[in-house]
Structures are given as structure tokens and as C-alpha cells.
Image (cartoon, grey):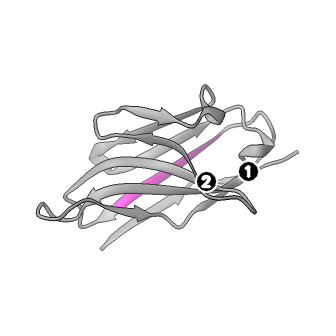
Amino acid sequence: QVQLVESGGGLVQPGGSLRLSCAASGSIFSINTMAWYRQAPGKERESVAAITSDGITIYVDSVKGRFTISRDNAKNTVYLQMNSLKPEDTAVYYCNAHLRQWSFEAPQNYWGQGTQVTVSS
């Protein structure tokens, strides 16, 4: 069984910063891509940032230059450093990992429970 546990959300003023963490635990053989998604009220879930096991990153245009995704492969953990936050960044942020529990299986997607980020004065 695999669990993804997020932490670091909260309330922050516009222009502020937050750092999200997501740790994967359980029976894990390997992790390919790890990513952050977000879902604002009344909107569809969108991809925010992703990072491969080799450290290649990709961002949605709206967060480029403000957010940084990173990972610690030894700890099976992915981070999202969010700077210069805007009210439109308000959403529930979800961690995603594309991983294998066993060497003989195809990779599958796993999701965290989500953490609320609210940007408001």
C-alpha cells in the first residue's frame, strides 16, 4: 500500500510564500514523475508543476518564475516552493506520483489527500 501525505498549506497574504511537501511511503520500487496539481472552487483540476526522476521540470505558464518544484529521491519526497503568491493561486493542492510498487508491474498514479492554500489579505 502506498500513501502520499502532503503538508505545508495554509493562509498567506498576497506576495507571501509557502512551501508544500509531499512524502510517499509504503511499498515502493521506483518513482518516475512526481507532480503538483491544484483545484480551485468551481474549476477543473490543473497541473501546476512536475519533475522527473532525473530532475527535469515543467511548469504551467501561470506559475513560471514564482514556483519551484524539487524532489529528494532518497526520501521519496517532492516539494513546491511558492513565492509571490497571488489570490488566484488559492486552491486545494494535490500531490501526484507515478510509481511502481513492484518491479514487475507497470507504473500507476497515486494521489495525496490535498492541502488547502489560501492567498488573501
Q: Position of residue 73 (x, y in %)?
A: 29, 44
Q: Is residue 52 above or below residue 3?
A: above
Q: How many marks?
A: 2
Marks 2 and 1, how far apart at CA: 9 Å
Q: Is the residue marked by circle 2 packed among few (<14), some (14-19), or many (20+) residues within 10 Å?
A: many
Which residue is found at the position 28% from the left and 34% from the top? 54
CB contact under 8 Å: marks 2 and 1? no
Q: Is residue 57 above or below residue 95?
A: above
Give the residue number, with chain letter if any, for mark 1: 90
Queried whether the magenta region covers residue 77, the answer comes back as: no
Q: Is residue 3 above or below residue 86?
A: below
Helix, strand or loop status at disc 2: strand
Our reading of the magenta stretch's main secondary structure is strand
Q: Quadrant of residue 53?
A: top left
From the image, which quarter does the C terminus lie in? top right
From the image, which quarter does the N terminus lie in? bottom left
The disc labelled 2 sits on which kind of residue? Arg
Q: Residue furthest top?
A: 65
Q: Position of residue 65 (x, y in %)?
A: 61, 25
Residue 12 is labelled as: none
Q: Depth check: 114 or 49 in front?
A: 49
Q: Is the residue marked by circle 1 packed among few (<14), some (14-19), or many (20+) residues within 10 Å?
A: many
Give the residue number, with chain letter if any, for mark 2: 38
Q: Position of residue 33 (x, y in %)?
A: 35, 47
Q: Position of residue 100 (x, y in %)?
A: 23, 60
Q: Depth check: 17 or 45 in front?
A: 45
Which residue is found at the position 34% from the left and 40% from the top? 52
In the image: residue 83, left or right of residue 118: left
Please provide the residue range marked out in magenta: 18-24
Which residue is found at the position 46% from the left and 62% from the top? 5
Queried whether the magenta region covers residue 20, the answer comes back as: yes
Which residue is found at the position 24% from the left and 61% from the top? 28
